[in-house]
Image (cartoon, rainbow, N blue to C red):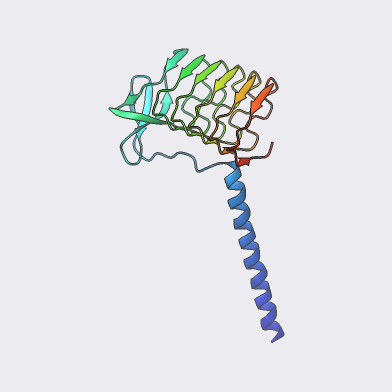
Amino acid sequence: MDTIMKGYQKRGRWLVGVISLLCCITLFGGLSGRLSLTVKAAEKTEGDYVYALSDDGKTAVIMKYTGKETNIKLPEKLGGKPVSDIGAEAFMENENLLTVTLPKGIKTIGKNAFKSCNALTGVTLPEGLTDIEEYAFWYCKKLTAITFPKSLRYIGSYAFNNCVSLTKADLPDGLETIGGWAFMYCKSLSEIRLPDSVRIVGSG
């Protein structure tokens, strides 16, 4: 009987451990970000843009910019479909970009989308944008100011980390989540407004 009870106790401790691990993954996953934007369709090219259709085929996702322009306004349509998202790493490490204007219809800026765009000084974000994913503007060291649209709900972890020239971040009413280390090392940041709608602020 003692042997049987010990067996049950071991299995019980194992089950508690598994449940605890799953709870931690759920909690910290919620703080660090959402599932990144994924696109399964084949990539196509139009002008200086590589794009793919979303899974439902109704919108286009910018996957890569191949041009050399310094001041660009992203297209509203690609392949005849409205552009809805900027995919992961689409503009990452582009050394030419000075300013970028995003068109209406953009919902998500993907992970690492503008990471290490060292010359980037300004970004115009459209109303309708809801998500800025992890590392989206990480180490854009010349980015001085950014205006967030009222539609924004989520800023991912490290999104503006090391934006050392950023001086102001006026976060909009309606924003719900600020991921961990989102504004870490923004040493020029002198003012930031946190709206009442914020429910989660991550570490750092």
- Foreground of the two, 32 or 3: 32
Work out whether residue 97 can be spotted. no
Q: Position of residue 11 (x, y in %)?
A: 64, 72
Q: What is the total number of numbered labels drawn onto the structure image?
A: 0
> In the image, what residue occupies the spot 64% across and 59% down?
20
Quarter of the image for residue 40 reads top left
Tell me: residue 95, above or below residue 159: above
40 horizontally vs 173: left or right:
left
Q: Position of residue 136 (x, y in %)?
A: 54, 30
104 horizontally vs 168: left or right:
left
Q: Position of residue 167 (x, y in %)?
A: 65, 19
> In the image, what residue occupies the spot 33% across and 29% down?
82
45 horizontally vs 38: left or right:
left
> In the image, what residue occupies the spot 61% across and 56% down?
23
In the rendered image, the residue lying farthest to the left is 80
For the N terminus, which image quadrant?
Answer: bottom right
In the rendered image, the residue lying farthest to the bottom is 1
For the C terminus, which image quadrant?
Answer: top right
74 horizontally vs 16: left or right:
left
> In the image, what residue occupies the spot 31% across and 36% down?
58
In the rendered image, the residue lying farthest to the top is 70
